[in-house]
Image (cartoon, grey):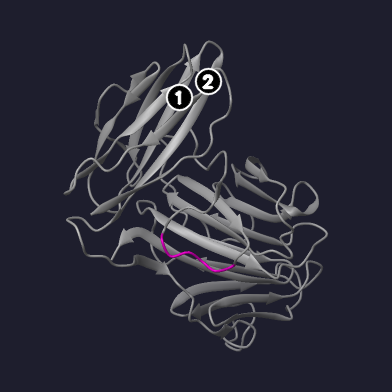
């Protein structure tokens, strides 16, 4: 039996408020369907569009896509593993409010069965020292590395050799400092993902305090270190200045232009508390959630406890496909990193 997983960030408060909820899967055999129910503020009207994330194609919807104050829509789901982007825009005079619901179809059809998610990258059993193995000269350091069958590159970004950069039983450990012992690691996912809904789970622990940010994660369309157009970045320990209770999430929109997705504030100190992020990526959009208190990575494919109020690609129904197949890990201070990446697809 398939299961429906919906993820919806909070909408902004206004007179044109709109919310969305999802009922159960309508069908018990493939193709499945889901039915979002919209509730709209008094006097507002709402227009809902549903697109399939893999190719940005429109989905045929049964039921009115406009409502005041409610509407129930039913859309066909092709198969387990599909992902859909449902965007509802409410208007009321000068007020506009948008809510996005992304729907994943999980499980195995037809009742019974089971299985695990199809892995893209899982380094949980990897042990490897970047400073003694691989690299340009073959004895460690900067350059290309093959780690657990995956392609990595390491650079020091103008600094000196770190005190340590290695996988130990699946945990990526960096020991150094922002002054001159930095590790910039780039992982190639090994496949194009512009039409593949996938999830990234990552956690940090043992993070060192910094005079600026202490760790940067970037999801990118290029292996080149630094920022470029369409790079999605997470700046740990930064809110415009050093702050160990903040993480800035932003997208580079070309050159040194950035769009802030959310400034995550009032966290428990990230240098003493493990922090996790989940990214559910569907081509040009990403749904982002986080929690704190454990570094252990989940296995159920679900979002984490707190959702960002806005997400990458919000409002971009017709967005161009984005092939973000490179994970950048820029270690500025001491940090232990755990991560895994899998398709939203059951084996």
Neighbour class for label 1 at 10 Å: few (<14), some, many (≥20)?
many
Residue denoted by label 1: 89
Visible in this render: residue 208? yes
Foreground residue among 68 and 93: 68
Task: Give the overall secondary structure of the magenta segment.
Answer: loop
- Side of 228 relative to 197 (left or right): right
Q: Which secondary structure, mark 2?
A: strand
Range of residues picked out in magenta: 295-300
Please report whichever mark, 2 or 1, sits nearer to the chain's N-terminal start: 1
- Above or below — where is 345 with respect to 321? below
Q: Position of residue 319 (x, y in %)?
A: 43, 38
- Side of 55 relative to 155 (left or right): left
Residue denoted by label 2: 96
Q: Position of residue 38 (x, y in %)?
A: 39, 27
- Side of 337 relative to 32 (left or right): right
> Which residue is painted at 56% across and 57% down in the image?
277
């Amino acid at each position: 039996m398939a299961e429906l997983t919906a993820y919806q960030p909070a909408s902004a408060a206004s007179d044109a408020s709109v919310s969305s909820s999802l009922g159960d899967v309508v069908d018990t055999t493939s193709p499945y369907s889901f039915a979002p129910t919209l509730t709209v503020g008094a006097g507002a009207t709402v227009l809902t569009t549903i697109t399939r994330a893999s190719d940005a194609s429109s989905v045929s919807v049964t039921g009115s896509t406009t409502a005041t104050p409610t509407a129930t829509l039913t859309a066909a789901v092709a198969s387990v593993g599909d992902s859909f982007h449902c965007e509802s825009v409410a208007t009321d005079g000068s007020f506009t409010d948008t809510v996005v619901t992304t729907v994943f179809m999980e499980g195995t059809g037809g009742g019974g069965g089971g299985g695990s998610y199809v892995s893209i990258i899982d380094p949980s059993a990897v042990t490897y020292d970047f400073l003694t193995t691989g690299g340009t000269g073959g004895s460690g350091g900067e350059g290309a590395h093959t780690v657990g069958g995956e392609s990595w590159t390491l650079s020091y970004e103008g600094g000196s050799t770190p005190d340590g950069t290695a996988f130990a039983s699946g945990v990526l450990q960096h020991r150094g400092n922002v002054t001159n012992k930095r590790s910039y690691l780039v992982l190639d996912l090994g496949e194009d993902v512009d039409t593949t809904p996938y999830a990234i789970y990552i956690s940090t622990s043992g993070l060192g305090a910094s005079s600026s940010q202490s760790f940067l994660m970037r999801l990118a369309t290029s292996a080149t270190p630094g920022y470029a157009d369409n790079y999605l970045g997470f700046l740990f320990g930064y809110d415009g200045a050093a702050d160990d209770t903040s993480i800035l999430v932003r997208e580079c929109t070309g050159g040194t232009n950035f769009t802030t997705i959310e400034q995550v504030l009032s966290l428990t100190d990230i240098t003493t508390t493990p922090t996790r992020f989940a990214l559910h990526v569907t081509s040009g959009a990403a749904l982002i959630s986080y929690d704190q208190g454990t570094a252990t990575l989940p296995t159920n494919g679900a979002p984490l406890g707190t959702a960002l109020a806005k997400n990458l690609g919000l409002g971009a129904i017709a967005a161009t496909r984005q092939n973000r197949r490179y994970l950048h890990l820029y270690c500025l201070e001491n940090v232990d990193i755990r991560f895994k990446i899998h398709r939203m697809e059951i084996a």
